[in-house]
Image: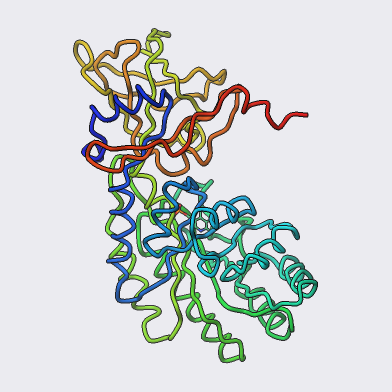
């Protein structure tokens, strides 16, 4: 269970100092997942590009960068954060379905490993920008391998009909176009089938399709250097990630002996278990036959339960009163969809008591907003058995209005 990385006495201390809501990350657990990937794939020696969208906090990204990870970024803002956090530009790949000309220029000037394009029009725009800068743009294509990852429809990306990537047939035409261009350097082919994928089978299928495609392309004269199998390895809420050795075995068989360098883009599996969201109980009440606990964190802090029906384990810090009962844990935001957990079994909490929402390290803070004019939460990093530091201060009311003119 993850609670051993988040000792109650330390959580109490952090909440007392940093206030609530606060995201608390465990450095030990984050590094444990990073190193589990490195161990599982040591035979293949891939480049890991941490998917910053999962959690772009400099405090965590810096840890990944120091372990030799690169980064997968999907906006100019993430690229800016990646470089600032210490990722080497030559290990950064720039993905995303709608990069603007300004973002493409920024990526090329930064010297990213490659731009992962998602349409012919984007490739033509990349070529135009490269010509203006008088350099050759290293590029990849995100290919939609038409594989069902059996996950939530909002995070299924590798089936034809989704907005992501291009088909193999279209990719072939685009690579031939790129290979003939003075301003484009075809470097890689990529897929990302979805997120929260719990079986290695769809990866193996997509990887076989990708490898066969790359071999056909090489026969046509376009030799790529990198095969990028994206991210998406699943992690169950409340647990550490499943052993990535399963994934390594599925992929190893496909790319071994091809001479291609492998890239992976894990995000959630590294970050999710490493964080908890700490909130304080404000009120309790009954509504119909339901028991509600109203806490000071809300859907603007953690939107996953409302958006995907994600079920995060919750636990009281300290003892509750009486026998366990069933509670909905809700926040102060004016939406019926504002809940952090439904049907949680807890003993009765007291107002002021702390409550921890587990597996909140990925797509938690990074998807948070100021909705209802709620300043965003603080973030803290546990660095040792009894040591921690603030890695992001809580926003203030002034921060809410600072950009307004
Ligand atoms: C291109 C790409 N790579 C990697 C990821 C990371 O996925 P996950 O956080 O599930 O590992 C995503 C997630 O959406 C993605 O779109």
Q: How many marks?
A: 0
Choose between 83 and 114: the one closer to the eye.
83
Relative vertical location of residue 284 with respect to residue 249 in this rendering, above or below: above
x and y, in percent, of residue 387 in the image: 28, 37
Q: What residue is drawn where x is 28% and y is 44%? A: 239
x and y, in percent, of residue 226 in the image: 50, 77
Q: What residue is drawn where x is 42% and y is 85%? A: 258
The figure's colour scheme reads rainbow
Quarter of the figure with the N terminus: top left
Query: Can residue 196 be seen here?
Result: yes
Q: What residue is drawn where x is 63% and y is 73%? A: 139
Query: Can residue 300 be seen here?
Result: no
x and y, in percent, of residue 214 in the image: 53, 81
Choose between 195 and 366: the one closer to the eye.
366
Q: What residue is drawn where x is 42% and y is 48%? A: 60
Q: Is 144 left, or right, of 120 in this rendering? A: left
**Quarter of the image where one finds residue 113:** bottom right
Q: Is 135 left, or right, of 374 in this rendering? A: right
Quarter of the figure with the C terminus: top right
Relative vertical location of residue 69 with respect to residue 258 in this rendering, above or below: above
**Quarter of the image where one finds residue 357:** top left
Q: Is 151 left, or right, of 97 in this rendering? A: left
x and y, in percent, of residue 220 in the image: 61, 90
């Amino acid at each position: 269970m993850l609670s051993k990385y988040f000792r109650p006495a330390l959580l109490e201390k952090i909440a007392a100092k940093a206030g609530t809501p606060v995201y608390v990350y465990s450095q030990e657990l984050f590094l444990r997942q990073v190193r589990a990937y490195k161990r599982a794939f040591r035979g293949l020696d891939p480049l890991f590009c941490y998917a910053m969208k999962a959690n772009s906090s400099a405090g965590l990204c810096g840890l990944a960068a120091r372990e030799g990870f690169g980064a997968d970024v999907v906006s100019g803002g993430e690229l800016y954060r990646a470089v600032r956090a210490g990722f080497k530009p030559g290990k950064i790949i720039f993905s995303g379905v709608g990069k603007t000309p300004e973002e493409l220029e920024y990526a090329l000037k930064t010297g990213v490993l490659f731009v992962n394009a998602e349409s012919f029009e984007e490739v033509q725009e990349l070529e135009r920008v490269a010509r203006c800068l008088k350099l050759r743009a290293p590029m990849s294509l995100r290919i939609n391998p038409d594989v069902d990852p059996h996950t939530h429809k909002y995070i299924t990306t590798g089936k034809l009909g989704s907005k992501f990537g291009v088909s193999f047939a279209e990719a072939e035409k685009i690579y031939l176009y790129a290979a003939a261009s003075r301003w484009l350097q075809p470097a890689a082919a990529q897929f990302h089938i979805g997120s929260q994928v719990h079986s290695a089978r769809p990866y193996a299928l997509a990887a076989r399709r990708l490898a066969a495609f790359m071999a056909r392309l090489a026969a046509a004269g376009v030799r790529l250097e990198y095969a990028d199998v994206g991210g998406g390895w699943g992690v169950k809420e409340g647990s550490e990630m499943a052993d990535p050795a399963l994934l390594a075995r599925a992929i190893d068989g496909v790319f071994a002996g091809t001479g291609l360098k492998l890239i992976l883009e894990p995000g959630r599996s590294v970050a999710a278990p490493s964080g908890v969201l700490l909130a304080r109980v404000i009120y309790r009440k009954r509504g119909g036959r339901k028991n509600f606990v109203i806490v000071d964190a809300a859907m603007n802090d953690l939107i996953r339960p409302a958006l995907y029906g994600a079920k995060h384990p919750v636990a009281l810090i300290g003892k509750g009163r009486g026998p366990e009962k069933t509670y909905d844990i809700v926040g102060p935001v004016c939406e019926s969809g504002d809940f952090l957990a439904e049907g949680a079994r807890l003993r009765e909490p007291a107002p002021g008591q702390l409550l921890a929402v587990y597996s909140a390290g990925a797509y938690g803070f990074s998807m948070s907003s100021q909705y209802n004019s709620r300043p965003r939460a603080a973030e803290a990093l546990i660095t040792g058995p009894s040591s921690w530091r603030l890695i992001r201060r809580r926003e203030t009311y002034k921060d809410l209005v600072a950009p307004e003119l």
